Image (cartoon, grey):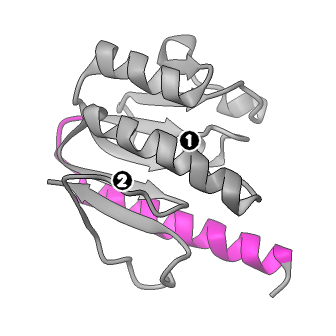
Protein backbone atom coordinates (compact mmCIF):
# COMPACT_ATOMS: atom_id res chain seq x y z
CA UNK A 1 0.00 0.00 0.00
CA UNK A 2 1.35 3.44 -0.85
CA UNK A 3 1.90 6.04 1.85
CA UNK A 4 -0.86 8.11 0.22
CA UNK A 5 -3.32 5.20 0.43
CA UNK A 6 -2.30 4.59 4.04
CA UNK A 7 -2.82 8.26 4.96
CA UNK A 8 -6.25 8.28 3.30
CA UNK A 9 -7.31 5.15 5.18
CA UNK A 10 -6.05 6.59 8.46
CA UNK A 11 -7.98 9.85 7.95
CA UNK A 12 -11.13 7.97 6.93
CA UNK A 13 -10.86 5.81 10.06
CA UNK A 14 -10.30 8.91 12.18
CA UNK A 15 -13.41 10.60 10.78
CA UNK A 16 -15.57 7.49 11.23
CA UNK A 17 -14.44 7.09 14.86
CA UNK A 18 -14.88 10.79 15.67
CA UNK A 19 -18.37 10.86 14.14
CA UNK A 20 -19.34 7.72 16.07
CA UNK A 21 -18.11 9.28 19.33
CA UNK A 22 -19.93 12.56 18.67
CA UNK A 23 -23.18 10.58 18.41
CA UNK A 24 -22.38 8.64 21.59
CA UNK A 25 -21.79 11.73 23.76
CA UNK A 26 -24.88 13.59 22.58
CA UNK A 27 -26.62 14.88 25.70
CA UNK A 28 -23.67 14.06 27.98
CA UNK A 29 -21.92 16.76 29.98
CA UNK A 30 -18.21 17.27 29.55
CA UNK A 31 -15.40 18.97 27.74
CA UNK A 32 -13.43 17.67 24.76
CA UNK A 33 -9.67 17.12 24.66
CA UNK A 34 -7.64 17.29 21.44
CA UNK A 35 -4.13 15.96 22.06
CA UNK A 36 -1.92 16.84 19.14
CA UNK A 37 -3.35 19.76 17.15
CA UNK A 38 -1.07 19.32 14.13
CA UNK A 39 -2.62 21.18 11.22
CA UNK A 40 -5.99 21.39 12.97
CA UNK A 41 -8.10 19.06 10.80
CA UNK A 42 -9.59 16.95 13.60
CA UNK A 43 -9.98 20.00 15.88
CA UNK A 44 -11.92 21.74 13.11
CA UNK A 45 -14.05 18.64 12.57
CA UNK A 46 -14.87 18.38 16.28
CA UNK A 47 -15.72 22.05 16.74
CA UNK A 48 -18.13 21.89 13.79
CA UNK A 49 -19.67 18.61 14.97
CA UNK A 50 -19.93 19.82 18.59
CA UNK A 51 -20.83 23.51 18.47
CA UNK A 52 -20.86 25.09 21.88
CA UNK A 53 -18.61 22.41 23.42
CA UNK A 54 -15.36 23.54 24.99
CA UNK A 55 -12.42 21.87 23.25
CA UNK A 56 -9.06 22.03 25.00
CA UNK A 57 -6.06 21.56 22.73
CA UNK A 58 -2.64 20.24 23.72
CA UNK A 59 0.49 20.53 21.60
CA UNK A 60 4.13 21.49 21.74
CA UNK A 61 3.56 24.40 19.39
CA UNK A 62 0.81 25.80 17.21
CA UNK A 63 1.15 25.39 13.45
CA UNK A 64 -2.32 24.65 12.05
CA UNK A 65 -4.13 26.22 9.15
CA UNK A 66 -4.99 29.80 10.26
CA UNK A 67 -8.73 28.97 10.33
CA UNK A 68 -8.06 26.18 12.84
CA UNK A 69 -6.34 28.03 15.67
CA UNK A 70 -8.16 27.55 18.98
CA UNK A 71 -8.75 30.45 21.36
CA UNK A 72 -5.75 31.10 23.62
CA UNK A 73 -7.73 30.19 26.75
CA UNK A 74 -8.37 26.69 25.33
CA UNK A 75 -4.74 25.84 24.53
CA UNK A 76 -2.12 24.07 26.60
CA UNK A 77 1.21 24.66 24.86
CA UNK A 78 4.42 22.89 25.80
CA UNK A 79 5.58 19.37 26.49
CA UNK A 80 2.52 17.12 26.50
CA UNK A 81 3.26 15.43 29.83
CA UNK A 82 3.64 18.75 31.67
CA UNK A 83 0.56 20.22 29.99
CA UNK A 84 -1.58 17.19 30.87
CA UNK A 85 -0.51 17.46 34.51
CA UNK A 86 -1.39 21.18 34.49
CA UNK A 87 -4.77 20.46 32.88
CA UNK A 88 -5.54 17.80 35.49
CA UNK A 89 -4.97 20.43 38.19
CA UNK A 90 -7.00 23.05 36.29
CA UNK A 91 -9.87 20.97 34.92
CA UNK A 92 -10.07 17.74 36.92
CA UNK A 93 -12.00 14.78 35.50
CA UNK A 94 -14.23 16.81 33.18
CA UNK A 95 -13.66 15.31 29.70
CA UNK A 96 -16.31 13.18 28.02
CA UNK A 97 -14.21 12.72 24.85
CA UNK A 98 -10.48 12.74 24.21
CA UNK A 99 -8.87 12.44 20.79
CA UNK A 100 -5.17 11.60 20.97
CA UNK A 101 -3.24 11.85 17.71
CA UNK A 102 0.16 11.30 19.31
CA UNK A 103 2.03 8.88 17.09
CA UNK A 104 5.16 9.56 15.08
CA UNK A 105 6.54 7.92 11.97
CA UNK A 106 9.13 6.22 14.19
CA UNK A 107 7.60 3.22 16.06
CA UNK A 108 10.09 3.42 18.96
CA UNK A 109 9.47 7.14 19.46
CA UNK A 110 5.70 6.55 19.25
CA UNK A 111 5.85 3.80 21.89
CA UNK A 112 7.76 6.05 24.30
CA UNK A 113 5.29 8.90 23.75
CA UNK A 114 2.28 6.62 24.34
CA UNK A 115 3.83 5.18 27.52
CA UNK A 116 4.46 8.68 28.86
CA UNK A 117 1.18 10.32 27.87
CA UNK A 118 -1.35 7.49 28.22
CA UNK A 119 -1.54 7.41 32.03
CA UNK A 120 -1.66 11.23 32.21
CA UNK A 121 -4.94 11.37 30.28
CA UNK A 122 -6.82 9.30 32.89
CA UNK A 123 -7.18 12.07 35.54
CA UNK A 124 -8.93 14.24 32.95
CA UNK A 125 -11.62 11.69 32.03
CA UNK A 126 -15.11 11.45 33.46
CA UNK A 127 -16.56 7.97 33.99
CA UNK A 128 -17.93 6.85 30.63
CA UNK A 129 -15.59 9.10 28.64
CA UNK A 130 -14.48 7.91 25.22
CA UNK A 131 -10.84 7.97 24.14
CA UNK A 132 -10.04 7.77 20.43
CA UNK A 133 -6.40 7.42 19.46
CA UNK A 134 -4.07 6.67 16.60
CA UNK A 135 -2.03 4.35 18.83
CA UNK A 136 -3.10 1.68 21.29
CA UNK A 137 -2.97 3.18 24.78
CA UNK A 138 -2.49 1.14 27.94
CA UNK A 139 -4.93 2.64 30.43
CA UNK A 140 -6.00 1.26 33.77
CA UNK A 141 -9.76 1.35 34.33
CA UNK A 142 -10.79 1.41 30.67
CA UNK A 143 -12.38 -1.07 28.35
CA UNK A 144 -11.92 -1.34 24.60
CA UNK A 145 -14.78 -0.24 22.37
CA UNK A 146 -15.51 -2.15 19.18
CA UNK A 147 -14.52 -0.11 16.16
CA UNK A 148 -17.33 1.21 14.00
CA UNK A 149 -18.06 -0.39 10.64
CA UNK A 150 -15.54 0.71 8.04
CA UNK A 151 -12.54 0.89 10.40
CA UNK A 152 -10.10 -2.00 10.19
CA UNK A 153 -8.49 -3.37 13.36
CA UNK A 154 -5.25 -1.61 14.23
CA UNK A 155 -5.98 1.46 12.11
CA UNK A 156 -7.49 3.44 15.02
CA UNK A 157 -8.31 2.60 18.65
CA UNK A 158 -11.22 3.38 20.95
CA UNK A 159 -11.68 2.88 24.69
CA UNK A 160 -14.19 3.89 27.37
CA UNK A 161 -13.34 5.04 30.91
CA UNK A 162 -15.05 2.80 33.45
Q: Position of residue 9 (x, y in %)?
A: 66, 76
Q: Position of residue 104 (x, y in %)?
A: 71, 53
**Which residue does the numbered mark 1 point to in the structure image?**
43
Quarter of the image where one finds residue 31: top left
Question: Which image quarter is the N terminus in?
Answer: bottom right
The disc placed on residue 131 is 2
Asked if the magenta segment contains residue 10, the reply would be yes
Asked if the magenta segment contains residue 140, the reply would be no
Q: Nearer the viewer, residue 19 or 13?
A: 13
Q: Nearer the viewer, residue 119 or 65?
A: 119
Quarter of the image where one finds residue 13: bottom right
Which residue is at 54% across, 64% downward? 14
From mark 1 to mark 2, how far is it between C-alphas? 15 Å
Residue found at the very far bottom of the displayed protein: 1
Q: Position of residue 57 (x, y in %)?
A: 52, 30
The disc placed on residue 51 is none
Tell me the crowding category of disc 1: few under 14, some 14 to 19, or many 20 or more residues within 10 angstroms, Cα based: many
Q: From this view, report whether residue 144 is shown above or below residue 5.
A: above
Q: From this view, report whether residue 44 is shown above or below residue 154.
A: above
Tell me the crowding category of disc 2: few under 14, some 14 to 19, or many 20 or more residues within 10 angstroms, Cα based: many
Which residue is at 75% across, 58% downward? 106
Q: Position of residue 20 (x, y in %)?
A: 36, 65
Q: Which residues are magenta?
A: 3-30
Amino acid sequence: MSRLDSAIRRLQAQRICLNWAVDQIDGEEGIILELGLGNGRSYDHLRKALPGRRIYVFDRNISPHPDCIPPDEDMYLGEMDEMLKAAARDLGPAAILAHADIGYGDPEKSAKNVALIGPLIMPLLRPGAIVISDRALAFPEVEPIALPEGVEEGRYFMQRRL
